[in-house]
Image (spheres, helix red, strand yellow):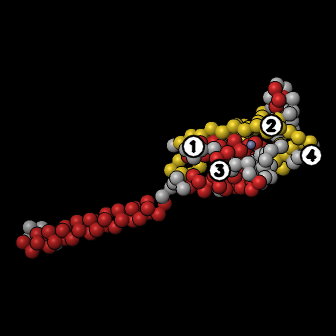
Amino acid sequence: MRVGIGYDIHPLKKGRPLVLGGICIPYPKGLDGHSDGDALVHAIGDAILGAGGLGDLGLHFPSTPKHKDISSLRILDRVQELIRGQSLRISHIDSVVVAQKPSLSPFRSKIARSLARRLKIRSRQVSVKAKTNDGLGLVGREKAVAAFAIATLIPERRKNIMHVKRGAWSVKRKTAAARLRTTHNARRTTQLAKGVVNG
Ligand SMILES: [Zn+2]
């Protein structure tokens, strides 16, 4: 099992859409950044890359014109490809979004479902928690939104290989049982012929 951690923070700016976990949340301010500023997806992406020993988002998604205003959900697609290349898969993701406003609690399950769908995992494998910053610092003064994430990766299931192995084992077991039956029958036939046992 491998574990990775991720963190991100983006400033809130008037007139920008507020996108968190790929969900657009109604609010007059949104997160500023080179992409859509989805701090939660960025923290999760970094956590997954960290667990896979694959560097960070800056390495795979530099702030070039190609990545200007891209949907951060595309980052998750790429991150998934990268960990599959390492024969790893996501076991669980835990995350915390820290925002003074708006209240994100009503959106938690919707955000988790959106992330799970994009990562092609079950909703129960994604946990999203929402906190305020108790009025402290930039987040507390509603100037920014931060996110933390932890990703747990496990080796990819090798279904086909297991199936073949199990099949081969089953054939072996059946052959051994048949051999035993044949030996038993042959012994019994000999004993019958010799009159050792009664038919
Ligand atoms: Zn970011």
> Can residue 16 be seen by looking at this rendering?
yes
Secondary structure of the residue carrying numbered label 3:
helix
Query: From mark 1 to mark 3, how far is it between C-alphas?
Result: 15 Å
Q: Any mark on residue 145, and which?
A: 2
**Figure check: 97 above or below 183:** above
Q: Nearer the viewer, mark 2 or mark 4?
A: 4
Q: Earlier in the sequence, mark 4 or mark 1?
A: 4
**Quarter of the rendering containing residue 183:** bottom left
Where residue 158 appears, as percent x and y from the top left, is 48, 58
How packed mark 2 is, by other alpha carbons closer than 10 Å (few <14, some 14-19, many 20 or more), is many
Q: Earlier in the sequence, mark 1 or mark 3?
A: 1
In the picture, the disc for residue 128 is none
Q: Earlier in the sequence, mark 2 or mark 3?
A: 3
Q: Please tell me in which quarter of the rendered image ligand 1 is found.
A: top right
Q: Outermost residue, left direction?
A: 194
The Cα atoms of the two marked residues, 1 and 2, are separated by 24 Å
Q: Mark 3 vs ligand 1: CB under 8 Å? A: no
Q: Type of residue at label 3? A: His
Confirm or deny contact between disc 1 and disc 3 (CB under 8 A): no
Who is closer to the viewer here, 43 or 125? 43
Q: Label 4 to label 1, Cα distance in Å? A: 35 Å
Q: Are marks 1 and 2 in contact (CB under 8 Å)?
A: no
Q: Which mark is residue 15?
A: 4
| Amino acid marked by disc 2 | Val
- Distance between the Cα atoms at labels 2 and 3? 23 Å
Residue carrying label 1: 51
Q: Quadrant of the C terminus?
A: bottom left
Rendering coords of residue 80 (x, y %): 62, 54
Task: Please tell me whether mark 1 sits on a helix, a strand or a loop.
Answer: helix
Placement of 132 over or under 32, stated as above or below: above
Disc number lying in front (4 or 1): 4
